[in-house]
Amino acid sequence: MPPGYTTRGERGQSGQDFMMATTSTPTTLLTGVHAQDHIHLIIGANPLAATRCGQSLAAGAKPIVVAPESSDVHYTLQKRIDAGEVKWLGRKFDEQDLFTLGREEAGKVVDAVFVTSGPRDPENAKISSTCRLNRIPLNIIDSSSLSTFTLLSTHSDGPLQIGVTTNGKGCKLASRIRREIASTLPPNLGVACERFGQARRRIHEEDRLAHAALENPEPVEFDADDTVDQSSSFNKLVLEQDLDAAKTRRIRWLSQVCEYWPLKRLAEINDQDVESVLRAYTSSSSSSPTTVPKTVPSSPKLGKLILAGSGPGHPDLLTRATHKAILSADIILADKLVPSGVLSLVPRRTPVTIARKFPGNADAAQEEFLALALQGVRSGKTVLRLKQGDPYLYGRGGEEYAFFASRGLEKAVAVLPGVTSALSAPLFATIPATQRDVADQVLICTGTGKKGKPPAPPEFVSSRTVVFLMALHRIEGLVKELTTPLPSEQLEAGGGEEGEEGEEGEEEEEEEKKTPPARPLWPLSTPCAVVERASCPDQRVIRTTLAHVHEAIESEGSRPPGLLVVGKACEALTQMEKGRMWAVEDGFGGIDIGEEIALESV
Ligand code: SAH
């Protein structure tokens, strides 16, 4: 099994299901401790004690340092002592300190102990047993066996904290990994987290005020600023459902932004972005943020619309034509699924707008984009409509072409194909869509029909590979539709038989029994695979069968976007171990063969 792969869902001997990770050594429970005003007892006065004091103060705790008067106090620690930030007890540690120096409300027991001298100190075993007995969290440097908690190698940027631990396998390595992770982050991410928090608070506050206004017809107190910028719908009757719908839309916008915007763009989120979402979704009537303008200022020269697919995720899967379009466009209108690796190729000067497409707002977002694209083209700009995968495969690309064609603008539109996730995701999951003697046809379908209705399920053909896009959120229903007759089919079958019995002779009835069911059903044992974020660094493949795919997703959680591949092809090149219900493969092997070889030979 390739490194980094874990297998789960194994059926145990007892018949009970259990999860299995690659290593049997338990990991630790990572938590963030609210340590405001906690008393941290730090034993020692060396440079490490100084570092611990810094960490403790950063968490809002109150460190007390205990070390003999004769100790060589590290100068940064001395500075903190002199400044009154750290309390200093110039004597040897006494076990009673654990129970007398703490907060009143904690019964004077200290909140945590940090021992800064090495594991060979004979005192440490004693401290460890006393702390364990009294449930006092204890950390002893370089001694995980005597400690009850370890500290992570951390990166902090405002409210954002990233912690790394190798669970005692190497703190230098943890620090290197932490640095590597931090170096890939855009600057100002901490500020972005702060802004996000503010946006969430504002949304909640506005919702609270709106509900208060609804419940209490008396005028509610608004800030002076709230009276400006009132929309024309200000005096409209607002119902409870309108408010709830608007609230849901705003919260969804925020969560979709978190999920899909490239981190670089997220880090640049500004007050204007937050304002625009608050204004755009203040009432249900404004759920269509921009409607197509009837008259658009025209320019002597018509621009161009390039409708292009950006592939499944990895920027190397862009076509050269689309790459050129990215570099030369005046404006880019990107779908929310367009991967950040692709967006990072956009020149800094080019404005990029990302669609506010989320469940319930897809049509409004689409309209908004069509309006912007039309505006751009009519004012002589080259507008790139960047879509994920291929633009004509469940990308509404055809509709966009038709929109322009209906305005006599088809000559201004160029359509560029893209590598579709429907075929590349199975490939990156080692699933050949067709394979001699295994699968001789491929069907690509959607799991979600128009207006959220389930589309007609495809019939079982043993040599068929079916790829379902937009299906994972309703996997349970989909599996049911594939494997059991629909209620309408049951009725049809039942009604038909009755009719035949009454009207036809016995011979005819025999004939009827031999007729295969209207829609052949998929056996529950059919192999299938969930492929998520194909070609992205966090690609994940879950191999299973129709019988267990729902349970597997429930248990592993989702990592959108993802699709489902069904059919024998799923085990043409890889096979799950017998008895296993599902297996998870995490990570993307990469595309650059040269690079891989170079790495392997190091
Ligand atoms: N035009 C796109 C499909 C758009 S529909 C294409 O040709 O690929 C969006 C669906 O595509 C998602 O719900 C998911 O099912 C699938 N999808 C898109 N990117 C994917 C990826 N990198 N890995 C797995 N599935 C993906």
Image (cartoon, rainbow, N blue to C red):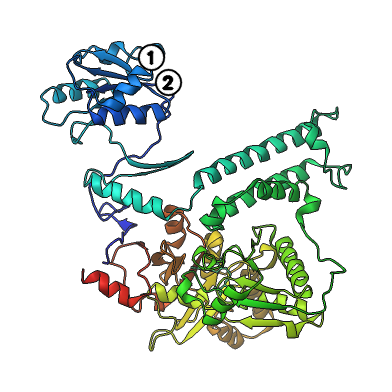
Callout 1 crowding tier (Cα within 10 Å): few <14, some 14–19, many ≥20: some
Please name whichever residue, 581 or 404, is drawn nearer the observer in this view of the structure: 404
Q: Are marks 1 and 2 in contact (CB under 8 Å)?
A: yes
> Which residue is identified by label 1?
103
Q: Position of residue 306 (x, y in %)?
A: 66, 78
Please name whichever residue, 208 or 517, is drawn nearer the observer in this view of the structure: 208
Q: Residue at x 29, y 54 (%)?
A: 20
**Figure quadrant of residue 408:** bottom right
Look at label 2 and name its amino acid.
Asp
Using the image, determine if residue 344 lies above or below residue 402: above
Residue 304 visible in rendering: yes
Q: Quadrant of the N terminus?
A: bottom left
Q: Position of residue 509 (x, y in %)?
A: 59, 83
Q: Quadrant of the C terminus?
A: bottom left
**Figure quadrant of residue 444:** bottom right
Position of 20 with respect to 512 (left or right) is left
> Which residue is identified by label 2?
37
Using the image, determine if residue 264 lies above or below residue 60: below
Residue 396 visible in rendering: no
Q: Quadrant of ligand 1?
A: bottom right
